[in-house]
Structure formats: structure tokens, C-alpha cells
Amino acid sequence: MLKKTLIAASAISLSAFAFTACGSDSAGGDATASDDGSITMGFAQVGAESGWRTANTTSIQDSAKEAGIDLKFTDAQGKQENQIQAIRSYIQQKVDVIAFSPVVETGWDAVLNEAKAAGIPVILTDRAVDSKDTSLYKTFLGSDFVVEGQKAGQWVVDNADEADTDGDGKINVVQLEGTTGAAPAIDRGEGFADSISADPSIKVVASQTGDFTRDGGKQVMESFLQSGDHIDVLFAQNDDMGLGAIEAIEAAGLTPGKDIKIITVDAVHDGMQALSDGKINFIVECSPLLGPQLMDLAKKVLDGEEVEPRILTEETTFDQAQATEALPDRQY
């Protein structure tokens, strides 16, 4: 089957450019094949809010190069309007395939319908969109965030005696949420709540967004600590917020991992190092290395092959000993 060519917008400048367009027709049908069989991919990234996101970007860029795919990359700087503008720029240039990680779940139907009308396939990576019309994208590649939250909550249930740091029979949990409206924040919170509901002694006493950033995690944790409530457990929905919280905990004269048990999600290098050092107690992996799978999916879609609508990444969990063992060969 012939491969197709897409031409996309570059970096932050999202206005229309005068590139020569080849690939898609304007009648909503499948993109036509280019003569040279080359592929160019337009990718609209969330931003660079965390170590995970940086590793994800690197994986996509490196994998595109290895696959011989010309990648045009846009950093949306955490703003949905920037991603929508980037996607419209890709459509205007008659690209063949668009991939992006949605900043938030909702508000995508209009621009995705524009891509569909132009005959441009869309692949979602890492994060889903909340739309009743699943024909607006070919597939969603990423983790099961609900399961990640469930794994985090299950650790608290399984280690309830250890998690009850003051021995009063109650386990007070504070939660650092990700970006409001983002799929991982919604789903990880749901999964965590689902698991801890099995033990009535475990209660989330405070929950606030840290926006998936280290600074956000530090600031919110400072406010949690200043509330005067005893905190047994911190669940941070990503490593970066957990790492920021560790700074706040230490500044308050407490020992992270001991006085307050800490569970995070991602398993980036800095988080794994903190786990190995005993400052974090448990990490649920969320792999950012989606690049190879994304490039393979793009080729299959452009060759007209059927792909599964939902493709999961393979992930695990880590305790202290496992983190120490894994660190020397950690890719991110």
C-alpha cells in the first residue's frame, strides 16, 4: 500500500504557512498517496509541564526520526486554544495525519469534525477526549488512568497498618490532583477513590490541583500542612507534584516516606530516585515512551489498515527495592 504525506505547522507559530500541500482531498475522503511515499506528521503536544512530558516529547521526536517520518511539532504550552489553533493550521495545510495529547477532555468536537471533513485521520496519544462521536479519531494510544489510580489506592488498602502513621485507626489522605479537566486527573482520582472505598478507615481529607507541576505540588502541599490536620498519606497524581510536595514536607521538619507515606504516578527518573531513597513509598508506572507505537500506528492508518480503537501501553509498579534495581537502565 502506498504511504501518504502530511505537512504540518511548526513549533509555536500557528498561523497559516505557504507550504505546498499534498495528501488529503477536501471532500472528506481518505488522503491520497504521495509519489515519493514519504510521511510527515503534525503533532500538537500539551507542553513541557513535567519530566514525564519531556520524556514523551523526546520519544516522539526520536521515534519519528528513526521511522523516517518528518515530524512537525507544536508545544501548546498547556493551553487548549493553542492546540486547536495548531490543529486548524495542520488542516489548512492539507496534512495527512494529525496526532495530539489533549490538554483537557472536552471541547474538541468542532475542530475534529473539521479534520474529518478534510479527510485527515487523527490519533490521540496519552490522553482521551470526551466525545460521543468516536469516528472523529482513528485510535487512542495510552495508559488506563483509572487502573493507575486503582493501583495507587490499593497500596494504601494493602498497607493500612503502615499508612496509619499516628496509630489512631484513621488514615487521612491528601491528594494532589493533575490539571483540572484533564483525563489523567479525572481518571486517576476516580480509580483511587474506587480502591480506598474498600476500607472505611481511609479518607481523603483534602484534594486540590497542583496542575501536574513540581511548583504546584509544593505550594499545595504547603497549604495542606498549614491546615493543622494530621496527614498520614499523600497521593500525588504524578511524580513531579510528589517531588514538589517532598520539598514542602521536609521544610516543615517532617520525613517524607516515614511521617507521611507518599504514592505517585509516572516513574520518571527523579521520582524513581526518590523512591529508591525512601522518600516515596510506591510508584505506579505510566510510560511516556509512546513514540514507536505512534509511528507504527500512523503508518498503518495511512496504509488503510484497521487498528484497534483503544491501544494500551504496558506498565508496572515499583517499590523501593524494585526502583533501586531499575534505575541504572531507566530511559527517562
Image: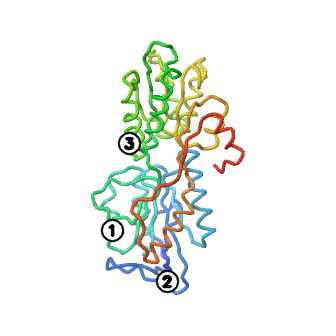
The relative height of residue 138 versus residue 210 in the rendered view (above or below) is below
Report the front residue among 82 and 263: 263
At label 2, the amino acid type is: Leu
What residue sits 55% from the left and 41% below the top?
A: 317
Numbered disc 3: secondary structure: helix
Which residue is rendered at x = 64% and y = 43% of the image?
269
- Left or right side of 115 for 242: right
Which label sits on residue 114?
1
Disc 2 or 3, which lies upstream in sequence?
Answer: 2
Q: Which residue is mark 2?
A: 2
Q: Quadrant of residue 30?
A: bottom left
Snapshot quadrant of residue 16: bottom left
**Disc on res. 186:** 3
Bin the neighbour count of mark 2 within 10 Å (Cα to Cα): few under 14, some 14-19, many 20 and up: some
Circle 3 Cα neighbour tier, 10 Å, few/some/many (<14 / 14–19 / ≥20): many
Q: Is residue 65 above or below residue 129?
A: below
